Amino acid sequence: MSEPIFQIRNLNFWYGKAQALYNVTVPIAPKRTTALIGPSGCGKTTLLRCLNRMNDLIEHAHAEGEVTLHGQDIYAPTVDVVELRKRVGMVFQKSNPFPKSVFDNVAYGLRTQGITKLGVLEDHVERSLRRAALWDEVKDRLDTNALGLSGGQQQRLCIARAIAVEPEVLLMDEPCSALDPIATAKIEELIQDLERFYTMIIVTHNMQQAARVSDFTAFFYLGKLIEFDDTKKIFTNPAMKQTEDYITGRFG
Amino acid sequence: MELHFDQELVQVRESLLRLSALAEQSVAKALKALVQRDAALAKQVDADDTTLDQLEMEIDERCIELIALRQPKARDLRLLVMTMRIATELERIGDQAVNIAHRAEELNKEPQLKPLVDIPRMAEVSQGMIRDALTAFVYAKPDLARQVIQRDTEVDQLNRQLHRELTSFVIEDPHTITRSLNLMGVSHNMERIADHVTNIAEEIVYLYEGRDIRHHHG
Amino acid sequence: MTLRRKTLDWSGLAFTAGTGAATFMILLMLAIILGNIIWNGAAQMSLRFIFGGTSEGMFDPQRAGIFPMIFGTAALVFLMTIGVVPVGVATAIYLNEYARKQSTLTRVIRAAINNLAGVPSIVFGLFGLGFFVQFVGGGIDRLLFNGHLHYAKPALVWAAATMAALTLPVMIVATEEALRAVPHGLREASLALGATKLETVFKVVLPQALPGILTGAILAIGRGAGEVAPIMFTGVAYYLAHLPKGVTDQFMHLGYHVFVLSTQSPDIERTKPILFGTVLVLLVLTFLLNLSAVLVRARLRAGRVAG
């Protein structure tokens, strides 16, 4: 792997008194897709939300250890969290488009950055919607309310919205778990397309999905990183028995 | 919907076609080495076999990877499994070509026993079978594959015929035994090659129809 | 095993009957009250009554006009609204979006709001008198007017302030409800896009909560139009010859006029029509206020869901 874009080193995390991550060390390769897998409660979503400090929103949650983006510790007191979140975007499990028009949804992040000229916004919005494989379906209804789209379309809209601000990294928290198989397949193809532009980190409880779309896989259990390797290796010949048990469905 | 997986499958098919071309070449070269009594060519066949073996291993590894990572179903699954099987058969065809090349080298040590008629004929049929099996694979024509299977009978007959002929040679003149045995060996190798192509044809039928016609030839 | 019902569902029937009867009773009472008012007050309705002034004779059904009371009520409600809505919404935003849920300060604020909601309205009147009229008004006069009496007296502004204080808990609670109803996912989405908390509140949360905030405003207005006790010491007048010209003037009020007619009337039987007429106008006004706010809220909701 070339120089990792994110380097997580000895990360520990607590929700109040309950520890959720134990000494996690894992590199994230640039412009590749890394999948975080493991049974419920293993800490994968916690780790994901540390990467853009969304965990800060939870009272009594705190992190210890090092998380560096391009070598800079994102938990340093001098770090502007708002800036961080512009460079590390997120797509959530349940799609959450704003109750505004399709256009306004995608333009939201751009407007908060101060871009207000309509022509510029239109260009960015179109490019984002094209990249998210949604343009053809919404180009004639940019002014309609986003809530009128189907579930799969809404999630792709959320992806378009997130990439409109041109982040370097895109975090995806179980992006397909609320979608039907066809919508899921579309988004999985999209993830593989987007790898050209963004580093992707995806949390999924569906390990087949991880196998299908990721280049690297990290397997977590009870807050610890059990194994991290090329996805090919993890799914054909994992090193740890726990990993093998989980992958073959013999867990528990 | 076009998938990234589709591109990967295309690459696997292309690898298999390359392997099949290599196997075909090996058979042709081995035969030429035999007919033209060309020792250098015989050595080439031996050397080429390494490439063939390598490619077969790569194809196997890639297919296993794709099965693990992509959870293929239906035709995709049959394609990957059959590709592995066909690759094995092609590799064995390559091995048989090497056997023929070795026997050619042995036969070159003594003057030619008799003009070669049956063996080139067997080779012609076998090579035709390989080519048609390839066409059936590339253009998804399981019926063509079925036809290929039927031609195996001719090769078997030619083998038996040559066997009888060579046996009578040996009875007449025991000094011809080395050359006769070698020629019988080559004939046997050709017959095995045809058998392998038959297997490939059966696998092609399974790939495109989902029907297992091994042992029934249905 | 058969699926046929064996016996009647007695408890279910009894429950339906009971709740149906209660509903009927309430509707009946409402009908009687409204009917009584309309029956007795309709005759009093005339353009002169509604638009005329008090100079002609407050207690004479033929000449009484209640426009000053309508004007005063409207002015009071208006000023009260522009006082209570910003303060209430800001407080609710602080409590719901910024404050740490378990901190002492938060708990103190919440306790204060709850207690404030329970204070009797007459006590609010006394508070208004002591705090707004005398303390704040007196302070302004000392600072700006060298002690000359401008603000330290009952006035429209102090009555409005007192009413704002009275309706503040309602406004805060209704706004908080509306804010809480905004799905947390929307806030997360906004923050994850690199918006600040402030931007999130103003661009995402408030627009979504607007119908609920309007509900709070409606409830506040409803109380404001009807409460009488808090304004008695802080600004309302028994009789004024002219309309209030500025916020430091006193005003007349529909609700207070009902009180006056019931207790100060020289001839109760004779002034009864005026009384019912005033009540009818008050009810219609309240109803119209509520209706317009409901319509605005409905249009906001419809604009949200449709294309």
Image: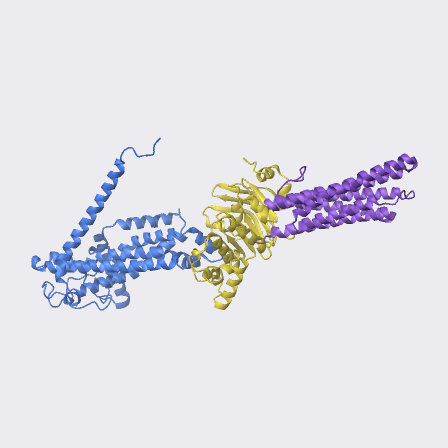
Q: Is residue B40 visible?
A: yes
Q: Is B50 displayed left or right of B60 in the figure? A: right
The outermost residue toward the top is C1
Q: Nearer the viewer, residue B148 or A92?
A: B148
Relative image position of residue C162 (x, y in whole percent):
25, 57
Q: Is B13 displayed left or right of C181 in the figure? A: right
| Depicted B72 relative to depicted C127: above or below | above
Q: Nearer the viewer, residue B97 or A117?
A: B97
Relative image position of residue B149 (x, y in whole percent):
71, 43
Residue at the image point whose x is 25% and y is 56% from the top:
C222
Q: Identify by letter the chain in purple.
A: B
**Quadrant (top left/top right/bottom left/bottom right) for the N terminus of chain C:** top left
| Chain C: colour as depicted | blue
Q: Is residue A165 visible?
A: no
Q: Image quarter for residue B72?
A: top right
| Depicted B99 relative to depicted A83: above or below | above
Relative image position of residue B216 (x, y in whole percent):
66, 37
| Chain A: colour as depicted | yellow
